[in-house]
Structure formats: C-alpha cells, structure tokens
Image (cartoon, helix red, strand yellow):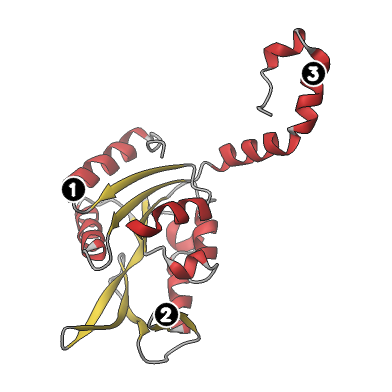
Amino acid sequence: ERTSNPKDLFRYPRKVVVSIVKNADNILKNIVHKTEQRKIVIITGQRNQGKTTFLNELSKKLKHKKIPISGFVAIGKFTNNKKTGFILKDVNSNHEIELCSREKIGTQKAGKFYFSDAALEQGKEILSAKNSEKATFTFVDEIGQLELNNKGWSDSVNLLFENKNTQMIWSVRKDNLKTVIRKFSVSEATIFDITTDSLEDVITFLENTKKTGSNLNPF
C-alpha cells in the first residue's frame, strides 16, 4: 500500500490509521533515507577507457583552482604493454603506493589482481574523517567488485556519507553503475560519461555546486 496522505485522516480516519501502522517500517526507512541524502558525482566509462586519467586530471585542475580535495586515484602499472597492477595515488599529497598486482601481495583478490593489505589500510586512512573533513571533494577510484562484496573501500565510503562537508566523486564502470547505486543506497547522483562529457563540463558543475551549496541532480 502507498503511504497515506495526511489530508485523508479527516475523511477516512480508521483506514488511514491502519495504513500508517502497516506502512510504519516503510515510513521510517523513507525518513532515514531522506535524512542521510546520499548524494554523489560519478565518472563512468567502460573498462580501460580512461576513467582514472580523467579523474587524475580533474583533481589537478581543482587543486590549481585552490579547491580543497582529498581521496585517491588508482593508476595502472604496465609491463610490455600488459597491465600488471595499480598504484594508489593520494590526490592531495601525490604520495604513491602499490595497490595491487598479478603477484600475490595481499589477501584480497578481485579478478586477476591481489590487493596489498598495507595499501588498503592507507587508502582507508586517506578516506578517514580527519583527512576528508576539510575537503570540498573526495575522490574514490574506483567503486567496483571489492566494494560490492563489502570489501575494499566499502566501509570507508559508508562513513564518508556521514561527512556533510565533503562531496564524493566516484569512478564506476558502466556495467556496474546500477548495482553500485543500489548497493550504497544512493539517493541522488550526477553521472558524467567520459565519452561524451568534458573535464570543463564536470568542473563547471562542481564549481556551481560549491558556490550555491545546491544538491545534485536526482538519479
């Protein structure tokens, strides 16, 4: 049943009271959902299409504009034109650490890559409240299979939603978009596709959001 309209209380008091009781759980969930207002910006594209390069350039341009940022990008590492792993780069300090490799360097695995426990801990520290509370935008590259399985940056992302001072910018593969949005109960998202949207498009949007404090476009 749909949630009752308060105006109906004066017309059908018994029906509305029963309906409210029946829908109490849904009403509570809606209140919690609206209170959290999980809003994000997503940069999307296909695998190996350039999402990280796009995010890396975006972070540089925001820093050049003196806009406070935090978070990281995961830059591909290649040997003989073959991707052998990823390097985690702090977008604020530019510090780098090996994130994952085809060799077994850690306990968590996604696809063909093993993830370094030390790098995962460093990534979580970068996303921690003390490092992100002063940032206008926080980069998370990327949200994927690890996070969908409650690993990787999953816990850190959920905690970041509680930080009202920073706006997260994620990279997400196109084929994971809907699943990721459902997984993290995202209420509103603005999605930029790197094949059709430019850096200038994203920067203009972010600057307008920063100036006005306005909400993101409903997904």
Q: Judge the density around disc 3: few (<14), some (14-19), many (≥20) Cα neighbours within 10 Å.
A: few
Label at residue 15? 3
Give amino acid for label 3: Lys
Taking the spot 50% from the left edge, 51% from the top edge, the residue there is 182
Q: CA distance from mark 2 to mark 3?
A: 57 Å
| Residue 173 visible at all | no
Query: Image height check: is 16 above or below 67?
Result: above
Look at label 2 and name its amino acid: Ala
Asked if residue 82 can be seen in this view, the reply is yes
- Mark 1 packing: few (<14 Cα in 10 Å), some, or many (20+)? few
Image height of 3 relative to 114, above or below: above
Residue beneath the point at 19% across and 55% down: 61
Amino acid type of disc 1? Thr
Which callout, 2 or 3, points at the residue further toward the start of the chain? 3
Q: Earlier in the sequence, mark 1 or mark 2?
A: 2
Q: Which residue is mark 2?
A: 119
The one nearer the camera, 214 or 211, is: 214
Q: Position of residue 175 (x, y in %)?
A: 36, 58
Occupied quadrant, residue 9? top right
Question: Helix, strand or loop at disc 1?
Answer: loop
Residues under labels 1 and 2: Cα distance? 33 Å
Estimate the x, y position of residue 37 in percent, counting from the top left: 52, 41
Say which quadrant the C terminus sits in: top left
In the drawing, what numbered circle is on residue 196?
Answer: 1
Tell me, yes or no, whether the two marked residues, 1 and 3, touch with CB atoms within 8 Å.
no
Q: Nearer the viewer, mark 1 or mark 2?
A: 1
Q: Is residue 152 left or right of residue 46?
A: right
Which picture quadrant has residue 30? top right
